[in-house]
Amino acid sequence: MNLEKIMSDLERKNPGEKEFLQAVREVLETIIDVVVENPKYQAASIIERITEPDRVISFKVEWVDDKGKVHVNRGYRVQFNNAIGPYKGGCRFHPSVTLSGLKFLGFEQIFKNSLTTLPMGGAKGGSDFDPKGKSQAEIMRFCQAFMSELYKYIGPDTDIPAGDIGVGGREIGYMYGMYKKLVGEHTGSFTGKGRNWGGSLIRPEATGFGAVFFAEEMLKTRGEKIVGKTVALSGFGNVTWGAALKATQLGAKVVTISGPDGYVYDPDGISGEKIDYLLELRASNQDIVKPYTYEFPNAQFFEGKRPWEQKVDIAMPCAIQNELNEEDAKNLVKNGVMVISEGANMPCTPEAVEIIQEAKILYGPGKAANAGGVSTSGLEQTQNAMKLNWPAEEVEEKLHQIMKNIHEACKKYGQEEDGYINYVKGANIAGFIKVADAMIDQGVI
Ligand code: NDP
Ligand code: 2IT
């Protein structure tokens, strides 16, 4: 079994799909020994099968803006693997969306969903539509147009979309409304729904909460606690918000947030009313980060920079892929960072990961650390199926336990001879075995 040969075959099959190939290489590097040691995986060609999506749906989305101009975007759904449950994964609306990006996210989702212990397969969808600067009515029309095609391919036992970058409660509402109208059913075929129409309490906060719980578990392996630690967060979206809330609740101090144009450093900590203020700015569709410094003058805005140059105990990239590079990793290590817990999917470049792991820093990759979001989506599906709602405390307790279980699984498969826990290896192997075994059980189909 030769990794370079597998990768060159994949490069030929998926030309130019840089992000997808990056994600596949990272997984294959860490699971190859398991495949070599278990001939059943090679005999069933699991590597070849698991790296090929079951189905890629690509469609045209036509919509009309407020001035009457007609626009065309491209919509996608990548249904990657449903060996352990119906396809499940978010939708991303962002101008950077490409098929390669969604294949990378769908591929990662297979292993992440497997780690959650819940029965969910891997998928991802989205569009190159840019929600920035669009009116409420334009967002609604786009979501409806997107759903007028996607509805044919999803359903509560088939494929259950959710949010991601550019897709929050509002967009899910518009998509779900259209879905419901087209299929004539009020079924749980989306997660991240509004609380009074089938959504789960804690789902909006869940990804950030989970990533903080995961950081806490990692710290415990070194006899450390989260209370009193300083935290750098990037972005200020769905995930960052939840992470800021939970880190603050647990007694840590969040000192940064960021946007594509720079970051804010607040030495007094970003908590309480400051988080509420940011939410208000975000809801008003404004440039969210910089105005923070007008409202809270002790804070400083660093234009064109990333938060990773600050000295902190915990770094949590929560914005977008490849947002923390080699130089950033060197800075964090030099400044004595203890933990890196990824709220985003693949935010650290491979070069950054190498530096972080060489320095034996506790490093939780996205597919483990940010699995709290999709886990709570799974809990939302369960509540929908049972036709009841659990209180927030119950959902949070279940989420917390799932994050602890994921941490244990990573430890089981990732602990190295010197005691260092390689969470990348642990997450990939634990996630892989379950899906690969299910594929073998179900035969060649
Ligand atoms: P949002 O759209 O809510 O937030 C993204 C945030 O990142 C925004 O504040 C955005 O700023 C900012 N941002 C975008 N590009 C950059 C950049 N280059 N540098 C710094 N900041 C940037 O998305 P989510 O919070 O939902 O998703 C964030 C990440 O978490 C993604 O990787 C996603 O895949 C992952 N994730 C999300 C889950 C969820 O439940 N939502 C679950 C698991 C993972 P602006 O708005 O100004 O562009
Ligand atoms: O990357 C992710 O795990 C998500 N965007 C959440 C997926 C989901 O189905 O809740």
Image: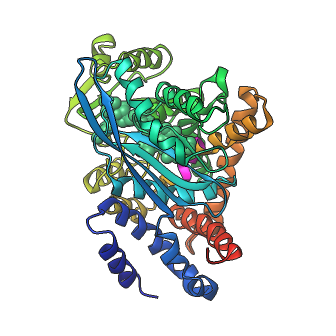
Q: How many marks?
A: 0
- 249 or 439, which lies in front? 439
Q: Is residue 173 left or right of residue 386?
A: left
Rendering quarter of residue 41: bottom right
Q: How is the image coloured?
A: rainbow
Residue 152 seen in the figure? yes
Residue depicted at x 33% and y 13%: 296
Residue depicted at x 35% and y 49%: 321
Residue depicted at x 69% and y 47%: 402
Residue depicted at x 65% and y 24%: 197
Q: Where is residue 286 shown, x and y percent of the image? A: 30, 19
Q: Residue furthest left?
A: 304
Q: Is residue 400 left or right of residue 309?
A: right
- 164 or 424, which lies in front? 164
Q: Residue furthest top?
A: 295
Q: Where is residue 291 shown, x and y percent of the image? A: 28, 17
268 lies above or below 372: above
Rendering quarter of residue 295: top left
User: Which quarter of the figure is the C terminus placed in?
Assistant: bottom right
Residue 221 seen in the figure? no
Q: Where is residue 255 shown, x and y percent of the image? A: 39, 29
369 in the magenta segment: yes
227 in the magenta segment: no
Rendering quarter of residue 126: top left
Which secondary structure type mostly characterizes the magenta part of the structure? helix
Q: Which residues fall within the magenta stretch?
A: 368-373
210 lies above or below 58: above
331 lies above or below 399: below
- 174 or 334, which lies in front? 174
Q: Where is residue 214 shown, x and y percent of the image? A: 58, 47
